[in-house]
Image (cartoon, coloured by chain):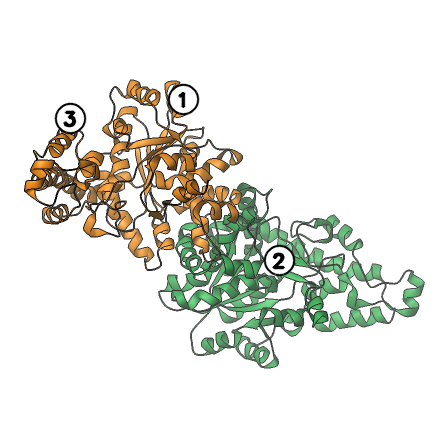
Chain colours: A green, B orange
Amino acid sequence: MQDEEATEEEFTVTPWEVEGKIDYEKLTEKFGTEKVDEELLSGIEDIAGETHFMLRRGIFYSHRDLDWILDEYEKGNEFALYTGRGPSGHTHVGHLMPWIFAKWMQDKFDVEMFFQLTDDEKFLFKFENTLEQTHSYALENAKDIIALGFDPEKTHILIDTDNIDTLYPLALKAGKRLNFSNVKAVFGFDNSTNVGSIFYTAVQSAPCFLPTELNEKDVPVLIPCGIDQDPHFRLTRDIAETIGYLKPALLHNKLAPSLDGTGKMSASQPKTTIFTTDSPEDVDEKVNEAFTGGRISAEEQRKKGGNPDICAIQNYRFFIFESDDERVDDIAKRCRNGDILCGECKGLLKENINDFLEKHQKKREKAKDRLDEFLFDG
Amino acid sequence: MQDEEATEEEFTVTPWEVEGKIDYEKLTEKFGTEKVDEELLSGIEDIAGETHFMLRRGIFYSHRDLDWILDEYEKGNEFALYTGRGPSGHTHVGHLMPWIFAKWMQDKFDVEMFFQLTDDEKFLFKFENTLEQTHSYALENAKDIIALGFDPEKTHILIDTDNIDTLYPLALKAGKRLNFSNVKAVFGFDNSTNVGSIFYTAVQSAPCFLPTELNEKDVPVLIPCGIDQDPHFRLTRDIAETIGYLKPALLHNKLAPSLDGTGKMSASQPKTTIFTTDSPEDVDEKVNEAFTGGRISAEEQRKKGGNPDICAIQNYRFFIFESDDERVDDIAKRCRNGDILCGECKGLLKENINDFLEKHQKKREKAKDRLDEFLFDG
């Protein structure tokens, strides 16, 4: 028993802290979520007409009530998508994962998308952040969302401090049903936690109920998000029905790894994280410094091969930058055989990233003038 | 020591609970406030050109930094007034006390007035209240404020859920500096307190900073309010300077007594509380049932006299309905001498109340069409 407990303590995942090497299988048990199985995958494929590499590769690997969302959809009861971002800095490519996937979902299912930028959260949870900074990053991040090509007719970007008039009544309803014990148990808060942070989860709950309010009928909500956000919505699900709303469903992705191979990609580690605002030189430098599965010398690698399983370069390709499965497998195979060395392999990734960023940054620049099309003005 | 502690425990005063017979002297010690002294009274009189019966009679009896407010005013640095009300029902005459006084202060000092109607609070702190109900009472209460004759050019009524866009950024700044220990110690919260209630005090803090934000310069704020509200602003004062604002000053009134002579007037005890919406018949009935200092028979009272010190009728007169000190004293004297019996005395009070309510209700009716002049639309 003791050993089991010790193992469970090896990693910590909360919305504000990810520590240790995450065992994603164990995490689903710990959180009590369901694994995405073959039946669900083909359910999505049947409706969408194709699958998405993030589903195929098990990046979106865990869920709550996704089966119910698909059943309702087939009955003609459309769901709304909801995801978000804490604007503590510029968007990094790890953030884009659920967004790229959500964009695909919107295209395939033709549904409404709600995007919450939580400038209040990032102000409350980090002492040195000012509200002016987090609000300004919210607008920066909004440009990335727009640049990904979401449908302006069906996409609504909420910035908490700008849209609090809409969110607050819903947050109050949720906040009345959650007590300090609940948030303490789920987030590990203690007596020194500030009262803004204690209330905050209610604000993140609010968009789960918004589509129902706006449509004046029950609208199922599907939240594609990093598994680290699950604790918030576990609380939301616990209280949703008592306040007259449907429980939101979730589809969780694994967290994008950092370039140094140690943990989750994080905006607070800029040297091991690719931002959407990075120049080609930044990308070259960061990728050059990345942790790989290479050997100590070129000679040895040619002889014994590298290890793509532990390689941050291969991970980046796998998680975001290469949608072609064969190409991903092929590079892994060539690595293992010693047919491709780290320099060349890094070069391929840099090309992928810089191609993507060149186009993205152009669209991002144009998005400046398109904010009004997307910002919620409920 | 033990005796002293026991005595201190005989009454409880928080914004949501008043229990036992309040010892107002002890309360200033417990809360750490200052008594309003002769120097302050004449300071106000010097500026106002007259005094107010609620000051003369020691109803507004305690303060924090009122001397500073007057000093600044004399230097040409005008303060803003701020008070509020939790809209859990119709306004009762006890609520009017600080409002009548605030109106006098506005007249005499010609200053801005901010009035907060906390529909969120009354939703969060009472399980059975809906947000629709508390919001609707907020609008009802607003009519009473307007009926009292505040200057529409200088008076701003905030309803929390309507004005949260303005209040939320300020509440976040306050809420980031207050932790669970702080609110636990001051309000007696525990792990079962809901997270909305835990955050709420930050929303009540927000208007303390609003005049400074609106004027883009430091504006001192004076809060005339019931002493039971002091705990909120004690917290505000603790953190104000750390977030770049002046500490609000306070002027506390004793709480209006109930008609049964047992405690504080309370909307939850409708039979012993006069509401501004009461008909003359309601008033007659409630006053007739009031607790008095009378004797068991008219004969005995004529012989031995009554006791106005414990009499709810005399209290009502003293606290609100008779501004003429001589008249208050004269009735007390006649009561003690047995020259006036309870029936006649009640008749005088009914006349006072019904005269007031008749005029008030007419102005309240007209206030329906004047809400826009007063509701904050910042």
- Say which residue label 3 marks: B326
Identify the residue at horizontal 30%, vertical 37% (top origin). Answer: B254
Q: Quadrant of residue B331?
A: top left
Can residue A65 be seen from the camera position used here? yes
Query: Marks 1 and 3, Cα distance to the nearest angstrom?
Result: 34 Å
**Dot 1 amino acid type:** Glu
Q: Amino acid at mark 3?
A: Glu
Q: Which residue is mark 1?
A: B72
How far apart, in angstroms, are the residues tagged by discs 2 and 3? 75 Å
Judge by depth and name the residue closer to the eye, B25 or B51.
Answer: B25
Which mark identifies residue A95?
2
Residue at x 61% of width, y 69% of height: A30
Mark nearest the camera among 1 and 2 is 1
Q: Quadrant of residue A58?
A: bottom right
N-terminal of the two: label 1 or label 3? 1
The residue type indicated by label 2 comes to His
* Residue lying furthest left: B299
Give the percent coordinates (x, y) of residue A28: 62, 71
The chain containing the residue under callout 2 comes to A
- A178 vs A57: above or below: above
- Which corner quadrant holds the N terminus of chain A? bottom right
Judged left or right of residue B26, residue B373 is left
Chain letter for mark 3, please.
Answer: B
